[in-house]
Every structure is written in structure tokens, then in C-alpha cells.
Image: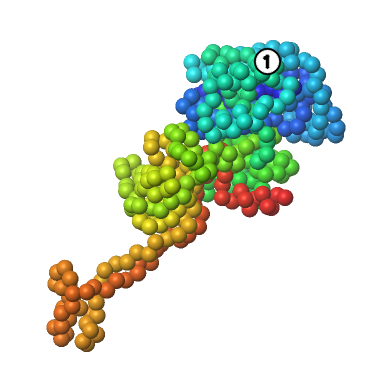
Amino acid sequence: MYLGVDDTDSREGMCTTYLMTKIIEESGEDLIGFPSLVRFNPNVPHCTRGNAGLSVRLGIGMGDPVKIGSFGSRPLISFPEGEDSGNQAEVLSKAVELVEKYMEKDPDTNPGIVITQEKLPSTLYELAVKSFVSIEYVEKIISGSSGIYRKLGNGRGIIGAASAIAWPGERATFELISYGFPHRNTDRKTKLSISAMVDSLKTTFDSYDRENRRPAMFPSNRTPIIYGIRGTSWHDLYRTRERISNTTLGEERFLIYKTNQGSDDHIIENPDQLTEGESYKLEGQVVSSPKYIKGGHYFTEISTKLGVVKVAAFEPTKRFRNTFRQLQKGDFVRVFGSFLNNSIHTEKMEIIGLSTIYNRVSPACANCGEKTRSHGLYDYRCPKCGRASSLPDYQNIARSIKTGNYEVPTCARRHISRPLALDFISEAAS
């Protein structure tokens, strides 16, 4: 059976991934494969923190198991294959019990639990990661597949729960999450040291923001998560955890998830139109120099096949703005980002071609070669021989930016956005 759960946390606390470890632990079922941590459209208005749903396959395990986590002193093993146990109703009841016990008591927390016999259609995932899905639409899909579900509050969580079950897992990375409940504080020096160590490994990504000295693998202290290590090799994540003093950090349990993080699955290529709240890859020619607005934000416009589109780089993108603000009219770029408030919020950018910029300068005297001096518009006179000229010279201005790929720093990157380095990391892991 496949079990999905979502929307048990709030911006103040808890984490659905922690609750999933409790469900796995107390379900009485074997774990088959990796549990899935699936990110969806980051622009959904009522999204949970990080906008992720969880799913897991449970049943009677078969084949040679491997250890992918531990709950206290008990190792958690996963089987490569399995068959259904027929205990859907019992597992749903236990999951509801645990959700009600651990969920955040918040008006905006509306959990959903879904159980199905088979994977749900991947088209549901595609819609959830790229656009918007209604509760009614999901209920029809679950019912059509003979699934069962339970809604708490308004039940909005069944959207993420069902969509996580629908994820085909084709472009995947992994995340090892370490938990302590209740959460223990870790000093910044320790966080920085661990993050820098993890970041130095070939198959990990987004662990440390070196540019801004931020330990990105350590989230807010409001959640039960101590840290999360992301990478392309689950074996490497397991070995990396062994290098960290987890006893000192207060680790209670850990689990490795298969994820769509770093996939760019939210990006729509070659769109026929732009829809508010969706994310796109667009290319076009810059039609105006970037303008600065109060707050540290920059805006420009590019001419695309869909017309002129406003493009923005906001203050949280930090040094990325230094490249963005140097764009000039005529540059040809490819941008990736969400279309919000009538502009693309840039996540990364490829500068395909740079325009040539000229500066008008005083010409050399045609008579004696001395540099002339300007005496007004189109009036240049030689200070040595007095000869006049009306035509200026033009000098090529060197550009301080180059063609190539640019991205926002780790601290500003969305979970689902693909870092530029991930292509190279994947090669190293293969």
C-alpha cells in the first residue's frame, strides 16, 4: 500500500517528515523502498512550510533489506520489494491517531492522509508541481483508484498527500534528515563547521552558503529537524552522518528520503502564455537597463515570443543582483523563475549573448592628430591647430560580465530549484 500525508505543520513548528517517521515506526508494516519527500509548486498561496508532501510504501517486505535510518537504538530497514498486507484500514486509523497527536494546532493546519493500493497517475504530480490542484479534483482521483482518505480541518492536506503518491521519482535526489524532539539548540559555530565539512563532499549540495556564511543544512529551531543533508548518493549521505557527532546534537532518530529536490520539475518550458503563480524558462532580448527600487530590488524587461516580460532580482538573492543589474539593452538571456505580480522572479539566469556598448568620445584631429576638445554638440576643435570637426569617435566599452550561467545563492534557492553544480555532482556520483 502507498500512504501519503501532508499539512501537519505550521510556520511555528512541527514537521510532517518527523510525523512520517512516527507513522512508519508504529504502523506494524515493513518499509518498502525509500519514503518520498516531494516538493510542489512553491507559489501555492496556502502551501505548508516548504510546500512538500510525504509518501511511503508499506506492506510485507521481500528481498535483502538495507538500513536507511534508525529510531533511537532500533535500526530502520527497507526492503527492495514487497507485497500488500491488506491492512489499509488499520494503518489509516493509526496514521490519523498520530497526526492528531503531533499536528500543529493552528487554524491554517489542515492535514490529509491518503492510502492507495497502487501509485496514483503521474499527471496529478505534474499538475501539483507546476500549477494548482483543488481538493475536489484530488478526491475524484483517489476515489477512482479505490483509495481511502481522511481529512482534518478542511482537509487541504490530501492534495499534497495524494500528489506525493503520484510522484514517479524519475529525477531524484536524497535527503538524510536528523531529528531531535523536542528540538535542541545548536550553536552557530558548530553549525558552520559541520555545514562546511558536508559542503566539501562531492555528492552533496545546498549544505552551506559560503558566500553569505549560512549553515543551510540547519533549519529553524522551531522544528524537530536538527539538520538535513541533501545529495545524489544515499550511501554517501549515510557515511556523512557517521562523521557528525549526533549524540552531541541530541539526535533522537534519522531517516533517508528520496526527493524531487533540485529537479527543476516546477519549471515550464516553451509556454504558450504566462499564468500567475507558475514558473517558467524564458529567453529573450533585454529591452531596458535594470532599474533599482527601494529595498534593494532590480527590475528589467526582456522581449520574448510572448511579448515584453518584466524580470526581477530581489534583495534576498544577494550578490546575484550584481550580475543582474549589469545587463544592458540588447543582451540575450535565458531566465528561470516564477511569474508573480506580473514579473518573473529570477531563480537563475543564462547570459547567452552580450550586446556591444559604445561611448562617444572626442575624435583625433584629421590635420595634426591631436585629440580635439568638445565645444558643444557635434563641435570638436583641435587645441593645437584649431581645425574643427563635427563627427565624434566611438569607443567600445568593456563589459564586466560574461556569457554563462548565474544563480541565486544557496540561502535564496528554493528546495525544488536545480543548482548549477548539480549536473556535475550527478556525474561524480554515477
Is 308 placed above or below 94 here? below
Q: How many marks?
A: 1
At which x and y percent is residue 60? 82, 23
What residue sits right under mark 1 in the picture? 148
Using residue 259 as the reference point, say whether residue 43 is left or right of it. left
Quarter location, residue 13: top right
Secondary structure beneath label 1:
strand
Quarter location, residue 255: top right
Of residues 356 and 428, which is closer to you in this image?
Answer: 356
**Mark 1, residues whose alpha carbon is within 10 Å: few (<14), some, or many (≥20)?**
some
Is 428 placed above or below 269 here? below
- The residue furthest right is 63
Q: Quadrant of the N terminus?
A: top right
Residue type at numbered disc 1 = Ile
Using residue 393 as the reference point, say whether residue 273 is left or right of it. right
Quarter location, residue 245: top right
At which x and y percent is residue 396? 35, 69
Question: Which residue lies at the image location 18% right of the left edge and 78% below the top edge?
Answer: 389
Question: Which residue lies at the image location 65% right of the left edge and 16% below the top edge?
Answer: 143
Question: Which residue lies at the image location 40% right of the left edge and 57% below the top edge?
Answer: 331
Of residues 19 and 87, which is closer to you in this image?
Answer: 87
Q: Can I make out residue 421 in this image?
A: yes
- Image color mode: rainbow
Q: Can I make out residue 13 in this image?
A: no
At which x and y percent is residue 249? 63, 34
Using residue 24 as the reference point, say whether residue 280 is left or right of it. left
Question: Which residue lies at the image location 70% right of the left edge and 30% below the top edge?
Answer: 35
